[in-house]
């Protein structure tokens, strides 16, 4: 499989009403005027996916969701499936975000089941891992994130496009970022764990960094070893900020 281009993905979380579609439209228009060297995605709340997909149709902007249920359909009140997200126009989905893991108790096994479901529904999964501050202070970062990646990546990913996102929990939404050395140490360890888990298939998938990526730190972070893009929360909500990060990627 050819080495995929880096990916800059926005994670809007539970933010955005109708007018937010304009922010995505601005990103799409900019990409049409000046194509980016990287792939660019916005993972929106489910209620906005169809509107975003229509608004940016014909542009290079990828539209994604933020979670799915592992079944295709069924009596699961409040949930949506990969097939439903795809039907609404999404082609990508974030899985196992630390907010899903900590607030909703999602396990590695569930994340792996959701990754299989994403492939079944035709979605490209971004599978998130990351250590808590306590785990880092206990010196367990690499053990934790490599354990998560091995247990969250199903072998079925072989032959499919996917990404892993390294997001230290303590860096999300806090304005704190690890040092470049800490980022590289984690990303390199994750690459090794992915190869151990999936063989060659673990070599090509991009490993994004996420956690307080902003216009002013993106260029430096994106040059770090094994960083194949970024998962951007707060700074993806405004087109100007998100585009500054996209352009920092080259
Ligand atoms: P942040 O969020 O960029 O606001 O820190 C990142 C994420 O949660 O994916």
Image (tube, rainbow, N blue to C red):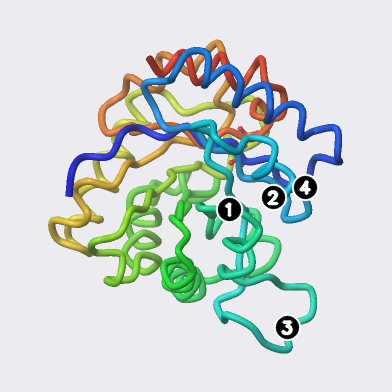
Tags 2 and 1 in contact by the CB under 8 Å rule?
Answer: yes
| Front tag of 1 and 4 | 1
Q: Are marks 3 and 1 in contact (CB under 8 Å)?
A: no
Which image quarter has ligand 1? top right
Image quadrant occupied by the C terminus? top left
Q: CA gap, disc 4 to disc 3?
A: 20 Å
Which label sits in the foreground, 3 or 1?
A: 1
Work out whether mark 4 precedes mark 3 in sequence or the reverse, and give the earlier one: 4
Residue assigned mark 3 = 76
| Residue at (64% x, 60% y) in the render | 100
Give the number of marks: 4
Relative to 73, is 221 above or below?
above
Q: Residue at the location (57% across, 70% down)?
A: 83
Instruction: Give the residue at mark 2.
Output: 49
Q: Horizontally, is 92 left or right of 205 in the view?
A: right
**Residue 90, disc:** 1
Q: Which residue was labeled with disc 4?
A: 14
Foreground of the two, 203 or 62: 62
In the orientation shown, which residue stands out farthest toward the front?
58
How far, Cα to Cα, is label 3 from label 1?
Answer: 20 Å
> For the residue labelled by badge 3, is the local secondary structure a helix, a strand or a loop?
loop
Q: Nearer the viewer, residue 218 or 63?
A: 63
Q: In the image, is residue 183 above or below residue 104?
A: above
């Amino acid at each position: 499989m050819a080495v995929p281009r880096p990916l800059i993905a926005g994670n809007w979380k539970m933010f955005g009403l109708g007018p937010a579609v304009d922010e995505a439209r601005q990103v799409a228009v900019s990409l049409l005027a000046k194509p980016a060297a990287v792939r660019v995605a916005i993972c929106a709340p489910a209620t906005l996916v169809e509107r975003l997909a229509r608004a940016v149709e014909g542009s290079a902007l990828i539209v994604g969701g933020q979670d799915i249920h592992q079944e295709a359909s069924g009596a699961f009140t409040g949930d949506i499936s990969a097939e439903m997200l795809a039907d609404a126009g999404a082609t990508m989905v974030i899985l196992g975000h630390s907010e899903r893991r900590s607030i909703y108790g999602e396990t590695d096994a569930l994340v792996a089941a959701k990754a299989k479901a994403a492939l079944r529904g035709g979605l490209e999964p971004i599978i998130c891992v990351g250590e808590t501050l306590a785990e880092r202070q206990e010196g367990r970062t690499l053990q934790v994130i490599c354990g998560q990646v091995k247990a969250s990546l199903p072998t079925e990913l072989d032959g499919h496009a996917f990404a892993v996102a390294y997001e230290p929990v303590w860096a999300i939404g806090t304005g704190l970022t690890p040092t470049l050395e800490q980022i590289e140490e984690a990303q390199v360890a994750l690459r090794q764990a992915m190869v151990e888990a999936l063989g060659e298939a673990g070599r090509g998938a991009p490993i994004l960094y996420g956690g307080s990526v902003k216009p002013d730190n993106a260029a430096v972070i994106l040059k770090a070893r094994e960083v194949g893009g970024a998962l951007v929360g707060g700074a993806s909500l405004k087109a100007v900020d998100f585009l500054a990060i996209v352009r920092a990627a080259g």
